[in-house]
Image: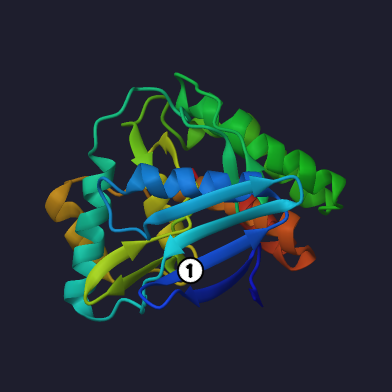
């Protein structure tokens, strides 16, 4: 099996079908991924879950094998945006979180329900990552600035934005296409502000304008750019905690820009 960031994986054949098999020493991580894919499946094209097995020594997740390629051309990006909008307009209870706890990369992610989005994002997203980053040696200036952002979160986030079902880990590496049809994978689902998914797509280099055109053709919305750096901060903290000091500057720069904004 070849190694990945959080799991070992391989493609297997049985003579009739091909399967994508993931193995991890923490079976809860694979159980959460399987549930996330099943959550998205009624609305989005995702790899079908064939089987998930958990044991004390680890877990195995078997998915249908899809020959996923990068999105290319405006029409494919528009289709991906349209598909995400269909997910975001799916009716769900007005409770933020409201999904079994799962993982963001290799980090545990609490989805305890809140009726207030600011409280949810502070207590279930930023605070756990910030506390872990402090323990891992995040520089003092970054710790202090990030703490100030958490204390003032109401400056950038609404208390009750529209509540949507989210992919939750939607960077460009978790999105592709098969025969021109958008495919989404490796989710970290929960219910929250749909701007979370849009912000993350813009985090590592951004996506073409055609994606947002497709999104807004299905779900007209104002892009809340003011909130995006807060959602970015969660992922920068997580990257610092998972991968180390090279992300300390991204944490500090993001917090500094937020505090400087009027």
96 horizontally vs 145: left or right = left
Residue placed most toward the observer, 214 or 92: 92
Q: Is residue 209 above or below residue 224?
A: below
Q: Is residue 147 above or below residue 224?
A: above
In the displayed image of the protein, which residue is found farthest to the left?
A: 217
Percent coordinates x, y for residue 19 in the rendering: 45, 69
Residue placed most toward the observer, 51 or 144: 51
Whether residue 122 appears in this view of the structure is yes
Percent coordinates x, y for residue 52 in the rendering: 53, 50
Q: Is residue 121 above or below residue 258?
A: above
Q: Residue at x 37, y 42 (%)?
A: 39
Residue placed most toward the observer, 222 or 59: 59
Choose top left, top right, bottom left or bottom right for residue 193: top left
The quarter of the rendered structure image containing the N terminus is bottom right
Choose top left, top right, bottom left or bottom right for residue 177: bottom left
Element on which disc 1 rests:
strand
Residue placed most toward the observer, 261 or 30: 30
202 horizontally vs 75: left or right = right
Percent coordinates x, y for residue 34 in the rendering: 48, 48
Q: Counting other residues with Cα less than 10 Å from the Cα at mark 1, is it few (<14), some (14-19), or many (20 or more)?
A: some
Q: Which residue is mark 1?
A: 20
Q: Residue at x 45, y 45 (%)?
A: 36
8 horizontally vs 258: left or right = right
Percent coordinates x, y for residue 182 in the rendering: 27, 66
In the displayed image of the protein, which residue is found farthest to the top?
A: 115
Q: Residue at x 46, y 72 (%)?
A: 205
In the displayed image of the protein, which residue is found farthest to the front?
A: 15
Whether residue 227 appears in this view of the structure is no
Q: Is residue 139 above or below residue 95?
A: below
Q: Residue at x 54, y 44 (%)?
A: 32
């Amino acid at each position: 099996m070849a190694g990945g960031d959080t799991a070992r994986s391989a493609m297997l054949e049985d003579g009739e079908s091909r399967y994508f098999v993931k193995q991890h020493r923490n079976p809860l991580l694979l159980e959460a991924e399987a549930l996330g894919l099943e959550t998205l499946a009624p609305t989005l094209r995702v790899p079908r879950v064939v089987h998930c097995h958990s044991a004390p020594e680890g877990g195995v997740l078997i998915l249908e094998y899809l020959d996923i390629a990068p999105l290319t051309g405006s029409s494919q990006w528009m289709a991906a945006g349209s598909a995400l909008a269909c997910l975001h307009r799916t009716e769900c209870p007005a409770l933020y979180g409201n999904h079994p706890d799962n993982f963001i990369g290799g980090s545990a992610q609490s989805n305890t329900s809140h009726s207030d989005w600011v409280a949810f994002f502070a207590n279930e997203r930023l605070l756990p990552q910030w506390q872990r980053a402090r323990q891992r040696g995040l520089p003092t200036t970054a710790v202090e600035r990030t703490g100030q952002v958490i204390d003032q979160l109401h400056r950038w986030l609404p208390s009750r934005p529209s509540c949507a079902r989210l992919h939750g880990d939607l960077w460009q590496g978790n999105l592709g296409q098969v025969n021109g049809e958008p495919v989404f994978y490796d989710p970290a689902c929960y219910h929250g502000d749909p701007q979370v998914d849009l912000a993350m797509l813009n985090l590592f280099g951004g996506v073409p304008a055609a994606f947002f055109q497709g999104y807004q053709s299905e779900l007209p919305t104002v892009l809340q750019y003011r909130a995006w750096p807060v959602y970015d901060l969660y992922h920068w903290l997580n990257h610092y905690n998972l991968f180390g000091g090279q992300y300390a500057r991204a944490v500090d720069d993001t917090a500094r820009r937020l505090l400087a904004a009027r």
